[in-house]
Image (cartoon, rainbow, N blue to C red):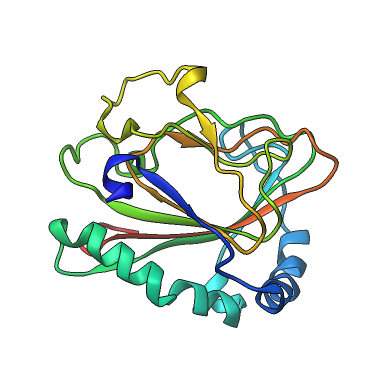
């Protein structure tokens, strides 16, 4: 219900220290080998590392987490007979990365799917997400806004959460990566689900 109305929520402490250590061990060698983004949207001081199901056994567990799957199913059920894994990536915001422009992930399919929620998304925090290191910026309640809406600063908040927590957010909520003003990387695992009749 919170996803339907606010468009985002945080579940704290879903992963423990051992889970985080395994994820970091499996993923960080690939993250370190990934080049920075080539444009402002991808982030010129941001790396995005994909193919996580092939590369990380622990990520497979996250993809199949029972509570997340149950939530995604409930959220997407009105629009499909089945849903699918849409995207997997590790997003690392390096120090000095500016804020990403606020957008909707549903725009991956253009702006033609009006009245249909195409996806349910997660970002699993491998590091603490703080105001200083670029915790994801979200506009709660923006699921009902028109596509040409412009979020004002007072309408935005940040998904501050400790490592091991997960941000769930809809494809319709306005959001973006925050600015990393800290001296360390902000790292999250972005796993998203979409309607089964959409191309991934």
Residue at x 65% of width, y 73% of height = 16
18 with respect to 123 (left or right):
right
Residue 7 seen from this side: yes
The quarter in which the C terminus is drawn is bottom left
Between 169 and 100, the one lying in front of the other is 169
Is residue 166 positioned above or below 130 on the image? below
Residue at x 49% of width, y 19% of height = 154
Between 28 and 7, the one lying in front of the other is 7
State which quadrant residue 109 falls in. Answer: top left
Residue 17 point in image, percent of width and height: 71, 73
State which quadrant residue 36 falls in. Answer: top right
Residue 115 point in image, percent of width and height: 15, 40
Residue 33 seen from this side: no
Residue 137 point in image, percent of width and height: 54, 35
Residue 176 point in image, percent of width and height: 52, 36
Between 14 and 195, the one lying in front of the other is 14
Residue at x 41% of width, y 55% of height = 121
């Amino acid at each position: 219900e919170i996803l339907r109305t606010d468009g985002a929520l945080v579940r704290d402490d879903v992963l423990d220290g051992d889970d985080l250590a395994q994820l970091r061990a499996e993923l960080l060698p690939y993250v370190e080998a990934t080049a920075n983004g080539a444009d402002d949207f991808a982030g010129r001081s941001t790396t995005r590392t994909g193919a996580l199901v092939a590369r990380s056994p622990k990520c497979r567990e996250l993809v199949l987490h029972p509570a997340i799957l149950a939530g995604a199913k409930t959220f997407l059920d009105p629009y499909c007979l089945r849903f699918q894994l849409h995207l997997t990536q590790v997003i690392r915001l390096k120090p000095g990365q500016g804020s990403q422009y606020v957008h909707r992930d549903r725009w991956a399919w253009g702006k033609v799917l009006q009245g249909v929620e195409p996806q349910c998304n997660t970002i699993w925090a491998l590091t603490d997400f703080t105001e200083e290191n670029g915790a994801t910026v979200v506009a709660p309640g923006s699921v009902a806004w028109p596509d040409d809406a412009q979020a004002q600063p007072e309408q935005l908040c940040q998904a501050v959460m400790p490592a091991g927590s997960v941000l769930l957010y809809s494809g319709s909520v306005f959001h973006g990566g925050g600015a990393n003003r800290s001296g360390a990387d902000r790292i999250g695992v972005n796993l998203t689900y979409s309607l089964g009749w959409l191309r991934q």
